[in-house]
Image (spheres, rainbow, N blue to C red):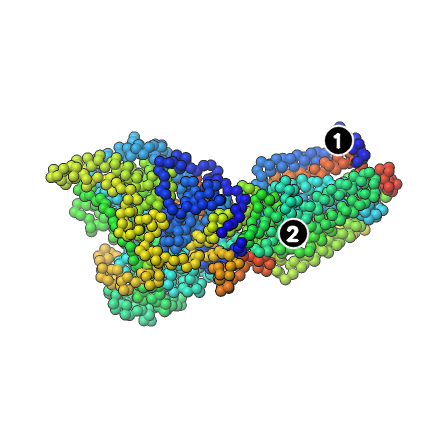
Amino acid sequence: MANYGMALDYKNCINCKACEVACKEENGVLLGADSHRIWVGANDVKGEWPNLDIANASFMPSQCQHCENAPCQEVCPTQATFYDENGIVQVDVDKCILCSYCMVACPYDARYVDDRTMTVDKCTFCSDTRLVRGEITTACQNTCPTKVRTFGDLDDPESEISILLMTREHFSLKAHLGTKPKLFYLT
Amino acid sequence: MFNKILPHRKITIKALFEFDKTPFNIFMGFLTFILVMAFVVGVGNYLIHGHHAYGVTREHPWGLMIAMYVFFVVSSTGLCIISALGHVFKFKSFEFIGKRAIFGAIITIISGFAVIAFEIGHPVRMAIYNTISPGVTSAIWGMGVLYSIYLGLITLEFIFLSRNDHKWSTMFGLGGLVIGIAAHSNLGAVFGFLIGRPMTNGVFYPIYFILSAMITGCYLILLMYGYKYKMKFNKELTKFLVHIARLLGLLLGILIFFEFWRFLTAIYGNVPERADTALHVLASPNFLFGELLLGMLIPFFIILFTKAKAIKYLIYASFGGMIGIFFMRYDLVHDTLVYPMQMMKITEYQLAPTLIHYSPTWTEWAISLGAIGITLSFYYIGENFFFLDPIEHDEYFEDYQEIK
Amino acid sequence: MQVEISRRKFLQGTVAMTVLGGTALSSTNLFSSVHTAKPVTGDINFGTTKTGTGKITQVATLCEMCVNKCAAFASVENGIITKLNPNPLFPKSKNMLCPRGNAGIQSIYDPDRLKYPMVRVGEKGEGKFKRVTWGEAYEAILNGTDKFPGMKKILDEEKDNRSSFLFCAGEGMAEHTFKQFYQAFGSANWLNHASICLQTVSSGYGVTLGTYPQSDLENAEYIIMAGANRAEAIVTPDSMDLFKRTKGRGAKLICIDPRFTNTAIKSDKWLAINPGTDLAFVLALTYVTLTEELENKEYIEKHFNNYEQYKESILTNKYTPQWAEKITGIKAKEIYTIAREFAQAAPKAVYYPGRRSTFSKNDFQLRRAMAIFQALHGAIDCKGGLVFGKKIPLKSHEGLAPLYERSEARAVVKNTNAKVGEAGYDDCAVVSGGGSWLSWRNHYLTDTHPYKVRGMFCYKHNPMMNMPNTAKTAQMLKKMELVVTIDTMPSDTVMYADVVLPECTYLERTDPVKTFGGVEPSIAVRNKVVEPLYESKPVMEILNGLTKKISKPLFEITKAYDEDVQEEIEDSSEEEVYSEFDLNLPFKHTQEELNHHAVSMYEGAAEKLHKDGVFYPDMDKYFKELSINEHQYYPENKKAYSVRGGAPKTPSGKVECNIKSFAQKGVDPMPIWRDEYNFVVPNGKFKLLTGRHAQFTQSGTANNVMLRDLMPENFIWINKRVAKEKNIKFADIVEVSSETGKVQLKAYPTEKIAPNQVFFIHGFGEESDALTWAYKNGGNDNTVISDGMEPVYGAAAMHETNVEIRKV
């Protein structure tokens, strides 16, 4: 009974990819280029050596945004994609028919096909692995060397993440689409 | 007894092979056989390797098979609409095509379902959970449910048409038409509802689908009757075909008009994602040769410059037109997905993401084109065992006599 | 809190087992009840686990995937390690695990790992071995086989010259254990990774400031990081502290690097510099500081030796920024700005020492100049500057260091130090503890050692991959008559071994407790998480078994040739004398017993270390969780920023600007510039640079599937414009060739590197076909890098090779 989200102090990110490995190890995600729940994105550097653009070359970790108005949930024909009671967008493995509509509808490239179940998979905020045993941290947050991520309950006004979001400016990706993503990038 | 429900000729295997062994017919038979075999082999490979047999990727999850599915259901809806012009809206000159057109609608949608059954990962689950756990905001749910109902309605319509029961056939025909249009625009809405895809998002696809369905229907009618009469038309038939051609001309004109404004508004202002995709599409050979030239311009100009009179050329052009329609469907799927949702490199040693590349695997080609073989087989079966043309007790038999 | 357990079904076993399709585990030891893991607190019970058992046990360990030793908790379910999580209690790593730390699970479950002892049956280097028992392996080491001689034969023929055996080891927590074997054995030939790593930088600071310092990046306001890539070559806690504060959030980071690294991306300013010319940059900074009187005169007065001489040298040599601009490529304006900004921020300013293999021949002078520049501002031993920190002492235990009369001195000897009758040679001015690998190897190959070295013991070390000129290293290993390797993976070096002894991975053993000094010191230990798989053993047990076998027989040889020993036996008894020569002595205790002893003076330490892996005095009082991401280890007033009142740790207590003893050895006593240091690349060629990415630790991780998932192979960085000229596109195979050798790998056109330089990361291109994923994957830089050395310590100079690039 919470509403989980994540704040990212993305300027800390050094693109080491510890979060990617921790996610795959924690959640048993298969290896393979297409098969990733979370990733750190980097821009191709602008300019010509030695005049290169530092400001533009940033690292942006990203994953499923667990939108409050998720397009993936809206387009699922069997309600396999649903919001659980913690505000996490989940995929019910038994109901997913792999029509891939959610993969087309997601504006964030968050979804992929899990080859073992032949259903659509994505970040679950570690709900079946860590949250279920009482650890309110995600694998990616826990392992980050520069502590980019803060995971917590947005409905609790005194949680760390709520305070962070109230005291620091932030933005979300593709906010103009109205998906109400719950990943907040602190500036 | 079965004959009472649905009138048909005697069905024997032997009868299937009794046809005029002209070179063209043998070629058609052979082609059908090859295509059906291709379908079987493709499905076999899919059953062995699963979804990995397809060339769809994480960024491009829909491919040739979805495009083919759309191709078939568009054909089906189109034929349904054209057929409805006859016995629902009672345009006299369109009445005699009723049964054939509806039969065409049935077999094309069955072929479409055959393709999509192997594209959806868990089709049986779909049947179950679409019913007990429906996602009513999902256009795919709407489309799936509506097309299932649609199939039922047009089957019943065909049955009642065959029994010359015009009260029921008209009712089911109307129902089929309305549900068909609803289903088809839902299919367009599958793409139109995508907020993350600026090129596709919006009102265009739900609406344009109906228009292109009618165009496809016209092409198919031209092809069907061109094939049946081996391009030898008497005066009455020619008159009918000219009517179709004029209708087609009007629809093509509207389509060209729609597409023009669609692309112009997409490019105007150079809005990122939308303009990039639109310009990419406009420059691609799929669009220029397929959609534009074969699908729209050649038939349109033939109709325009010959005042719809060059029926033979038009029928040949319809074949190109169907290819053009195929490219319209393929482009529909590809254009929706061509612009990546995230533009950053996720590993150091890669090129920066550009427009997504997709090419279908042989399995996808086999199943998709093979499904055409299914359509051809069913058409042949229908031609042989059902009464696709008006028969004695049919209401408009007399009109048909003249045409025949 | 209750979370609805999802209906997601977990597959049995870990990712390792599912992905690789088959069982990666041998069943022999896994569920053995003979050695049960000691009961550990921290059991967690809940519904869904990866093995469906519903129970997780947490064991405190320290990562061994690189030098940092980050503290981790290993989650064990049903005897299988399913996850490694950070341990928040360790002040050095600050509650994190990098990608390699997380991927550590793959090292224990790698199907390619060494499982049992092996003995060579094919030709040397073929990699053909036959499996033997431990007893047979020890027997082969002592007495040899038909393919190679044993220790007994060699030692006998060499008349008990114990130095006829070389001992080399890589860095690790058990290196100390192996070194005990070397010391007890009595050889003088010890080589470790220092001369292919940070020997020069640590010595440069060592002779100038007394020790190699750390940097207080948590409080520094201005940092110059030249040639150190902390965003990719992660060092704890520096990487953790620094990148939270750059980009206008408290610290200004100036990144000086020929390449546009990830550190450059995270910095506030990046300046491209010609490789190997950092010394000119530092001298120019010093020039500005001195001419504009930005230095801390009070500090210099109190803590400098020979300052006036150094100042005169700087000024008379006219090391102006304009002069430096021509050499380095950095604009004079920038040098002025940096010098001024540094002075303004001092003493909370750091010219980051760096910690890596040597760039070029002037590295020693460079590090000295850097140390002096830092000290000019008094930013030594203070908050925000360079710090020495405190170390929590441990009780040491007795080792064994017997004297063998017949044992020759170290086979790397400076001519002037050579004893009468001893041949010597001079590749480097100083022979440090870690020796000079390249010098040693090259002299071995040209038969210019003063005596014969015929056998080698190699522990956790991969000479075939780690040092320049791979071809020569292969020759060396072929020539060595007895090569014994102790390793976890079938590396390229193991392929050249005669006897292969499998060590268990770090997750399967308890290692010596270690004290980690710094501003927030602590003690940490690695606890065994699961029993060793297959027949692998910790090096402690391996040496225990080996020494039991060889000690007595080899002592017989000593008795035969060593006159001192013969006398002593006459004076007392053989038993008494042997008790000082018993090689098994250091290995009689278990590691747990030794660890207990080491921390015995701290109450409760042993238990805390066993349960939580970390201990420091008053830990329970000081350690607090401030937020999800931040912990307090020591309160601010208890942090050891200053331990010397600002004074350096040199014997004199002063910063040594002019070291006259070096002059006698032919080394410049003060950092000065020489023209031979200029950056020169012949037309059409490229300077080859090497370095790291955060996803790999040199060559040790090349076979790790999780890490290869992030980056399948290494690519060579070529400037985009140059690539276009040569019609080289992304992923085209190119051949890189130098006088030393050639290698092929894929090309990565990028603007992140200069048009006359190329770069690719180290550690790929293995030739061992026993490594499924690493075999012939990418390119090995050491095939191409020339084996030049810097002249002071004989460390490998890695950035002095010019290469040609050709599209294949």
The answer to which of C440 and C784 lies nearer the viewer is C440
Q: Residue furthest left?
A: C571
The answer to which of C655 and C508 lies nearer the viewer is C508
Q: Chain of mark 1?
A: B
Left or right, residue B97 beside residue B141? right
The amino acid marked with disc number 2 is: Thr
The amino acid marked with disc number 1 is: Leu
Examine the rendered structure and indicate whether residue C107 appears above or below residue A60: above
Say if residue A62 shows up in the picture. yes
Q: Chain of mark 2?
A: B
Left or right, residue C712 beside residue C316? right
Disc 1 designates what residue?
B16
Left or right, residue C805 beside residue C512? right
Residue C513 at x, y = what percent? 31, 48
Circle on res. B319? none
* Distance in Å between CA atoms under marks 1 and 2: 46 Å
- Taking the spot 37% from the left edge, 45% from the top edge, the residue there is C40
The answer to which of C655 and C583 lies nearer the viewer is C583
Quadrant position of residue C646: bottom left
Residue B158 at x, y = what percent? 78, 40
- Taking the spot 18% from the left edge, 48% from the top edge, the residue there is C419
Task: Report the number of discs.
Answer: 2
How many neighbours does mark 1 have within 10 angstroms: few (below 14), some (14-19), or many (20 or more)? few
Say if residue C712 shows up in the picture. no
